[in-house]
Structure formats: C-alpha cells, structure tokens
Image (tube, rainbow, N blue to C red):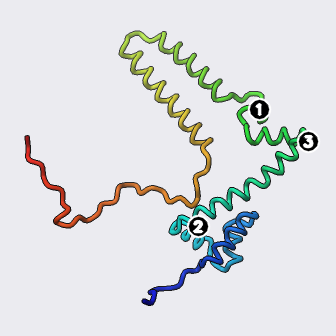
Amino acid sequence: MATIGRPRALDDYKRREVCALVAVGCGIEGAARYVGCNAVTIRREALRNPEFHEQLRNAELTCELEPLRAMKRAAATHWRAAAWLLERTQPDRFARREADSLTPAEIDGMIACIAEEILAELPDEDTIVRVGRRLSDWSNRLRREDRAAKRVRRDPHRRPPPPFPRQTMLSADEQPKPTPPT
C-alpha cells in the first residue's frame, strides 16, 4: 500500500544527526541548518515521536552537563572557580547581594511583624478577620510569584495541556443512560 502525502523530512539518520549535534552544543537551530530542515520541523517531530523527544532531551542535558563537569574539575583546584560555581548553583546562599537588599525570608519576617502590629490596633473581631485574610492572601501571592520566578524553565518539547477537556462524539450505543430520580 502506497503512503499518501509528502515524505517525512527527518528520517532515522537525520534524527540521529540532530541528536548528536545538539549533544555537542550545536543547538536545535544549528542542527536544523546542518540537516537541511527548519527548527520547527525538529520540534514538531519531537512532539509526534516520544522516542525522538527523549533522545533530543537527553542530548540537550548532555550538552549542559559537559561545561558543568569542567567547572567542577576546575573548582577542585581553583578557589575562584569554586566561588563562581557556588554563586551560580546556590544564589540564595552564595551570590553577591546589594547592601540594601532583603532575602525572601527577611521579607516574610517583616510582613509578619507588620501584620501583627496592624491586627493589634483593629477595633473589632470582624475587621481583624477581614484584614488578616487580606494580608494573608497578599503574602501568599508574593510567595507564589517568588516560586514562579525561581521555577525551572519548562521543557520546550512538551506540549501544553489543552485549556479545556476535549469532547468526543459518542455513538448512540455509548451515550450515558439517564438515571431515574430517587
């Protein structure tokens, strides 16, 4: 049986080439130019083919690990490399901060102190509950925004979930039977 449509731009050989090029640091765009296709074609193929998606993801991780390994080797003998590595991998603990900057923990402590003082000055219980809820909502929103800012970048090959569940057409046999009222 003959296949209908245009042949795939990425055969097995080209997919292996793409993964090899990405693993050595070429990137998806450069690998696409090398194999003669568009970067969108590679990303689309990764969405269609879970095995290729996994191979491409592993190639990207391999590319990221080599420089990290080199920095770790350098950090073993050079204190500046060790300091640089700590500043980049654990910025909350080791990165340089401006003299007037605050950590998230310091900000949380300040918000808690201010909230206690405000709540102590309020006249009645209803107002205390209402203002306390608003302060708590505000503090939670700040924490969520801080976590979102620190979140790792999402996998560029992962398809986002649909905004609503897809409805499928059911045949007459598959239609749910109405339940009688009790």
Tag shown at residue 78: 3
Residue 157 badge:
none
Where residue 169 sits: x, y (%)? 25, 65
The residue nearer to you, when weighing 21 against 113, is 21
**Is residue 80 shown above or below 122?**
below
Q: Which residue appears farthest toward the front when viewing the image?
A: 1
Q: Which residue is mark 2?
A: 52
Considering the image in quadrants, where does the N terminus appear?
A: bottom left
Q: Of helix, strand and loop, which one carries label 3?
A: loop
User: Given this view, does label 3 or label 1 mark the residue nearer the observer?
Assistant: 3
Task: Tell me the crowding category of disc 1: few under 14, some 14 to 19, or many 20 or more residues within 10 angstroms, Cα based.
Answer: few
The amino acid on which the numbered mark 1 sits, given as a three-letter code, is Glu
Q: Is residue 4 left or right of residue 63?
A: left
Among the two numbered marks 1 and 2 on one chain, the one whose residue lies closer to the N terminus:
2
Q: Name the amino acid, label 3.
A: His
Q: Look at discs 2 and 3 and give the one toward the viewer.
A: 2
Q: How many marks?
A: 3
Image position of 48 with respect to 79: above or below: below
Q: Earlier in the sequence, mark 3 or mark 1?
A: 3
User: Is residue 172 placed above or below 148 in the rendered structure?
Assistant: below
Earlier-in-chain disc, 2 versus 3: 2
> What residue do we see at 85% from left, 40% from top?
82
Q: Which mark is residue 98?
A: 1
Residue 59 shown left or right of residue 42 in the figure:
right
The amino acid beneath tag 2 is: Phe
